[in-house]
Image: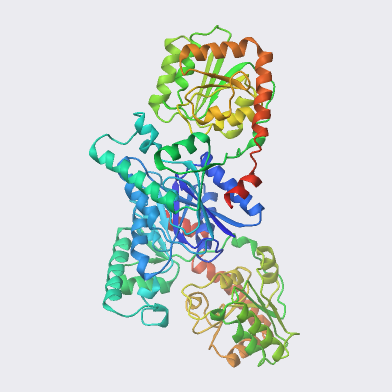
């Protein structure tokens, strides 16, 4: 079967989703199919561009393809008689982010109109798809709530699980990944100011904007945390990021309502427990409070208590890490199974 | 420099128009540039042509790429302040194939209107480009005739041409190309019946039309040519190609009226072998000059047979034409360094 994986392209940038698409292609081939990735270059910023980009995808024509597996908005608007969606990304600013006041869509009539257009197009694309998979219960619930869609959960495998081998702890709390106000790394710095001086924190990743970076450096300065915090603010090679995880005592991941907790899955693969928050969305599907980590309120004091606990009894922390690893591998998320389900 | 290479494509088809894009990509990367390849699907059907053109027009690479190089339509419509076209063909049934059976729709008011609109849009796309290059004189001539725009011919080199070498000269003329009716392998088998020397023929290449392959096979056996003609309808690996070309007598390439000179004739030239072709092969004639770097004869079995015998008998001339074939590549500047210099100028 000729299977075309359809994904968004950010020109000259290769993120996690591009890697996932490449692995999907590879594994489709391994299971005896022909596979290619169609990457559609998109510009969704400013928001006024979005409708033209949606129409662009919608107007593309193709032949010589038996099956489409589409991953992201708006690439999944592409027309094909046998289309399966594996929703790595919806345009959340038109949904829950918008309801939470976190949207880039203006509140004026044109902004409202864009939101309506996105929701209508999504509903049409979902209606014409043969199957729809969500990457987590969080995203499954959002689909049910806003679009009335019954999706199955299909957890994405890690792209480079082999990097997350684990290792002995150097005793720090690690927070990796993109840095922005939704990922809330600032909460961890505010928490650090409230814990004993022996707790150390490493934050590593690419800030979305200079303001996101400044917010963190200012907090370090304001609370005089310089000797206990390492800020490694850049786009890290995957191997370096994995090294940070492998040498950590515990990982912290406190995003607001994230679809899927890649960072938590990577931590678990490396046998590290995770500190997360009640409202972190998909991360909660991978972390069990006082079994594989800590699930606490998204507030500095609660996070401070969790960090202090993790650093106080390291035996317990290491045990949680082992349990986290068992839980993740127990989920049986593998590429062969993933490919099989996508083609059903 | 950040360079986006933009073209249209058919998923799951290898080779063809993809070669020029992907070979340029690796040459640019070797020259230290960052390259992003943008392939979007397209179907050349009159009814949905314009909506697809609109889609391509909405691709926005302005902030992400320093320069874009566009190949197959409708990729030439992607807007960019530093757009360069390396145009390889029009949507031909609205151009030179209008008055042929390839048109596939009536010559009515609606389609004449579409044709007029397409010509106007193409012309505007050529005009807004920083430079327009083509892959052959034939395409440049069409752009001048239909769109009244000047373009520069930039002959596409092959991938890593330094791989090819000249070894010895055997008795075998080789035709390494897809096996298709319009490539006319059958003409050469027919010619073999008329040869008077010990010249041999090898035909190798992938074949999609199985009935044509069967036809060739029975043609060989009917003429009792099994001992002198080798026919393999399979994909030839690059390393195999290098070996076969190193020791052959000459290469043949005689498609019917193609736009470009064809990679098989280029590969033969890099291996220092003369090229046998016909007077109606189209773009091949931009490369091959009769008696200089190959032989150009009528598309007739007897004429071809005579040429094959000449290549076999007069080895000194054959060798000299082989050396000239290599030299001709320099004259036409078919090198990656020249291509990159022009595309980035």
Q: Nearer the viewer, residue A203 or A328?
A: A328
Q: Position of residue B305 (x, y in %)?
A: 63, 89
Q: Nearer the viewer, residue B183 or B273?
A: B183
Query: Is residue A169 visible from the viewing direction of this image?
Result: no
Quadrant of the rendered structure where residue B267 is? Answer: bottom right
- Is residue A153 found left or right of A58 in the rendered image? right
- The image shows residue A330, relative to residue B38, as above or below, that is above
- The image shows residue B317, relative to residue A344, as above or below, that is below
Q: Nearer the viewer, residue B91 or B302?
A: B91
Q: Residue furthest right?
A: B227
Q: Position of residue B38 (x, y in %)?
A: 46, 53
Q: Nearer the viewer, residue B276 or A222?
A: A222
- Is residue A187 found left or right of A339 in the rendered image? left
- The image shows residue A333, relative to residue A246, as above or below, that is below
Q: Where does the N terminus of chain A fall, quadrant-wise? A: bottom right
Quadrant of the rendered structure where residue B152 is? Answer: bottom left
Query: Is residue B103 visible from the viewing direction of this image?
Result: yes
Q: Position of residue B67 (x, y in %)?
A: 40, 50
Q: Residue at x 43, y 58 (%)?
A: B342
Q: Position of residue A76 (x, y in %)?
A: 45, 49
């Amino acid at each position: 079967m000729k299977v075309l994986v359809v994904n968004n392209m950010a020109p000259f940038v290769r993120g996690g989703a591009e890697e996932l698409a490449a692995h999907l292609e590879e594994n489709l081939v391994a299971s005896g199919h022909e596979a290619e990735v169609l990457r559609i270059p998109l510009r969704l910023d400013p928001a006024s561009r979005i409708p033209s980009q949606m129409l662009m995808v919608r107007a593309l024509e193709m032949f010589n393809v038996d099956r489409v597996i589409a991953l992201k908005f708006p690439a999944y608007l592409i027309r094909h008689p046998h289309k399966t969606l594996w929703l790595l990304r919806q345009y959340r600013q038109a949904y829950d982010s918008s309801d939470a006041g976190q949207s880039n869509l203006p509140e004026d009539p044109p902004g409202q109109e864009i939101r309506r257009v996105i929701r209508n197009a999504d509903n049409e694309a979902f209606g014409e798809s043969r199957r729809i998979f969500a990457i987590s219960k969080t995203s499954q619930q959002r689909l049910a709530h806003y679009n009335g869609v019954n999706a199955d959960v299909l957890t994405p495998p890690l792209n480079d699980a082999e990097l997350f081998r684990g290792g002995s702890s150097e005793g720090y709390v690690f927070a990796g990944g993109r840095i922005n106000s939704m990922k809330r790394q600032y909460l961890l710095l505010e928490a650090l100011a409230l814990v004993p001086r022996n707790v150390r924190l490493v934050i590593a990743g690419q800030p979305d904007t200079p303001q996101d970076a400044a917010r963190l450096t200012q907090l370090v300065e304001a609370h005089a945390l310089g000797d206990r915090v390492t800020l490694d603010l850049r786009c890290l090679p995957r191997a370096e990021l994995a090294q940070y995880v492998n040498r950590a005592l515990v990982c912290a991941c406190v995003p607001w309502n994230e679809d899927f907790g890649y960072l938590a899955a990577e931590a678990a693969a490396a046998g590290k427990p995770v500190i997360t928050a009640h409202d972190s969305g998909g991360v909660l599907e991978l972390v069990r409070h006082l079994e594989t980590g800590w699930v606490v309120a998204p507030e500095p004091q609660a996070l401070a208590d969790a960090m202090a606990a993790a650093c106080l009894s390291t035996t317990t922390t290491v045990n949680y890490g082992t349990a986290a690893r068992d839980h993740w591998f127990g989920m049986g998320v593998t590429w062969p199974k993933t490919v099989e389900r996508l083609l059903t | 420099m950040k360079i986006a290479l933009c073209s249209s494509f058919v998923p799951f088809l290898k080779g063809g128009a993809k070669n020029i894009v992907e070979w340029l990509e690796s040459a640019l990367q070797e020259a230290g540039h960052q390259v992003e390849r943008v392939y979007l699907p397209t179907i050349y059907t009159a009814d949905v042509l314009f909506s697809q053109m609109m889609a391509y027009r909405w691709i926005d690479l302005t902030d992400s790429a320093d320069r874009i190089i566009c190949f197959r339509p409708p990729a030439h419509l992607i807007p960019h302040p530093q757009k360069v076209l390396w145009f390889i063909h029009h949507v031909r049934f609205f151009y030179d194939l209008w008055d042929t059976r390839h048109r596939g729709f009536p010559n009515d008011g609606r389609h004449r209107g579409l044709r007029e609109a397409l010509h106007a849009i193409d012309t505007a796309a050529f005009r807004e480009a920083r430079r327009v290059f083509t892959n052959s004189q034939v395409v440049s001539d069409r752009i001048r005739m239909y769109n009244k725009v000047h373009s520069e011919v930039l002959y596409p080199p092959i991938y890593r041409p330094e791989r090819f070498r000249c070894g010895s000269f055997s008795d075998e003329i080789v035709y390494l190309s897809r096996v298709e009716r319009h490539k006319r392998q059958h003409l050469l088998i027919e010619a073999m019946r008329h040869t008077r020397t010990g010249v041999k023929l090898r035909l190798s290449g992938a074949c999609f039309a199985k009935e044509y392959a069967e036809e060739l096979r029975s043609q060989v056996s009917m003429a009792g040519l099994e001992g002198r003609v080798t026919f393999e309808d399979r994909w030839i690996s690059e390393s195999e190609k290098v070996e076969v070309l190193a020791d052959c007598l000459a290469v043949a390439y005689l498609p019917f009226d193609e736009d470009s000179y064809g990679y098989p004739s280029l590969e033969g030239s890099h291996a220092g072998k003369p090229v046998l072709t016909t007077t109606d092969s189209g773009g091949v004639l931009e490369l091959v000059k009769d008696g200089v770097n190959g032989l150009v004869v009528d598309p007739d079995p007897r004429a071809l047979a005579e040429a094959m015998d000449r290549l076999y008998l007069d080895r000194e001339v054959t060798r000299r034409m082989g050396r000239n074939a290599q030299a001709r590549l320099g004259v036409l500047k078919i090198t990656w360094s020249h291509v990159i210099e022009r595309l980035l100028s």
